[in-house]
Amino acid sequence: MNFDRSDEQQMLAETARRVGEKFGLDYWRELDAKKEFPSAVWREICAAGLCGIAIPEEYGGASLGMAEVAIAVENLCAAAGGSTLSQMFMCNPVFGGVTISRFGTEAMKRELLPALVAGDALFAMALTEPDAGTNSLALKTFARADGNGWRLNGQKIWITAVPQATKMLVVARTRKLEEVGRKTDGISLFLIDVDRAGLTHQAIEKVGTHTLPSSAVFFEDVRVEGHELVGTLDGGFRELLDVLNTERIVTTAGLVGTAELAIRLAADYARERKIFNGAAIGSYQGIQFPLAEAHIQLECARLMNQKAAALYDQGKPYGSEANMAKWLAGHAAGLATDRAIQTLGGMGYAKEYHVERLWRDARLFRVAPVSEEMILNYVAQHDLGLPRSY
Ligand SMILES: Cc1cc2nc3c(=O)[nH]c(=O)nc-3n(C[C@H](O)[C@H](O)[C@H](O)COP(=O)(O)OP(=O)(O)OC[C@H]3O[C@@H](n4cnc5c(N)ncnc54)[C@H](O)[C@@H]3O)c2cc1C
């Protein structure tokens, strides 16, 4: 077992940290207040080659693995951006990059991967529906065969970065639920243009992650061409699961980075802030212990995530590790950001000190992309051999 980073990994970590620090905490606070998409930082991330880490070299990437993606995301998020920045990686290198690299046609790869690596193509992924969130197999959006393509009808909800995206990965039924033997059959993946006739979207007001809009999306007889199918017709769900598990690795990396940042901000403040008898509040165990606990949790989450990423890169099963890492990281970031607010007292509640943004944004990831409850269900069933409870 070797925990040392390779020279290449170290270089990636330093590059990511440098890019992240260039757009400091104030940049993110301003964008959050204006609810503005982080275009400038994404351009820089792409220019530094960080979006293309796991994309094959022949399409403009670096042909590295998920372990390297996790290192970059952790460092970008820890520098200033927090967990929101990891969502940019979920949408683009994961939902765009992993899906196309693994399941796309050659033409799709040639057209879209270099554009993705350069930051010219932006992606959204549309799975969740009003009645199909946790139970994604209840999805009703339907693609009806029409000549050499399909006609798409239905509704999605909570889709990230739709107004900015050029392409949307849409998960739809191509066979009705009542026609298939298994619920996982009859589902297909399509990669369509966001500006296509019949596709409309409407913003949802929310607690945080303000730099990345969330939208309800409506499909009314949207034309899908034959060449826009990604992967296997009617067999897309199993392919999607593979992509969703890589998303967990990126989510975890973002939360680990966020926890690190929140603890750093809290510890820095605690070292300086004096209230009684000239002693810094950081000398009190009541302040130290919760931060130390959060640090322990984040280190464990990081380790488990490295294992998940290593297994993925070796082509081995990694679902349990990816889920467990995500659960741990959600707790680590929750504790770290909450205790950072507590450490800063009233200032923890002020926008000026940044930790409230980290707390708002990180809270999302205990619900999405997979909830803590569903991770516990997964572990109970797959790792403990207990019966499925639902
Ligand atoms: C800001 C934001 C961004 C998002 N971005 C995207 C995106 O880009 N693309 C996309 O497709 N989706 C996206 N989502 C959707 C997200 O993946 C879903 O919200 C999530 O899967 C939960 O689904 P739900 O909201 O319908 O909750 P529900 O399914 O209604 O669940 C409600 C609660 O019940 C619990 N629960 C349900 N079943 C069980 C069970 N069997 N055992 C125990 N507990 C259970 C859940 O864990 C949850 O706590 C986003 C969501 C948000 C809030």
Image (cartoon, grey):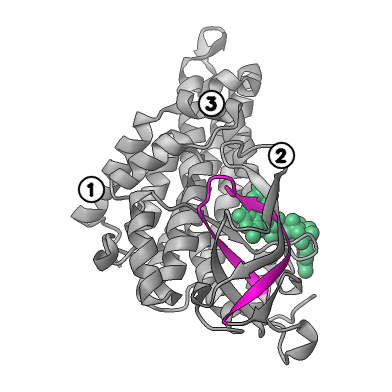
Contact? badges 1 and 2 (CB < 8 Å): no
Q: Is residue 58 left or right of residue 110?
A: left
Q: Is residue 123 left or right of residue 136?
A: left
Q: Main secondary structure of the magenta part?
A: strand
Contact? badges 2 and 3 (CB < 8 Å): no
Q: Earlier in the sequence, mark 1 or mark 3?
A: 1
Image quarter where ligand 1 lies: bottom right
Q: CA distance from mark 2 to mark 3?
A: 16 Å
In terms of image quadrants, where is residue 152? bottom right
Q: Mark 1: is the Cβ under 8 angstroms from ligand 1?
A: no
Local packing at callout 3 (Cα closer than 10 Å; few below 14, some 14-19, many 20+) is: some
Q: Is residue 59 left or right of residue 24?
A: left
Q: Which residue is labeled 3 in the image?
A: 29
Secondary structure of residue under mark 3? helix
Q: CA distance from mark 1 to mark 3?
A: 28 Å
Residue at horizontal 58 percent and vertical 45 percent from the top:
163
Q: Which residue is labeled 2 in the image?
A: 206
Identify the amino acid type marked 1.
Met
Q: Position of residue 160 (x, y in %)?
A: 60, 50
Q: CA distance from mark 1 to mark 2?
A: 37 Å
Identify the amino acid type marked 3.
Arg
Q: Which residue is labeled 1 in the image?
A: 11
Identify the amino acid type marked 2.
Lys
Secondary structure of residue under mark 2? loop
Residue at horizontal 54 percent and vertical 31 percent from the top:
288
- Which segment is the magenta one? 148-172
Can I make out residue 383 in this image?
no
Q: Is residue 164 magenta?
A: yes
In terms of image quadrants, where is residue 1? bottom left
Please state which of the two labelled residues, at mark 1 or mark 3, is closer to the viewer.
3
Asked if 135 appears above or below 149 in the picture, the reply is: above
Secondary structure of residue under mark 1? helix
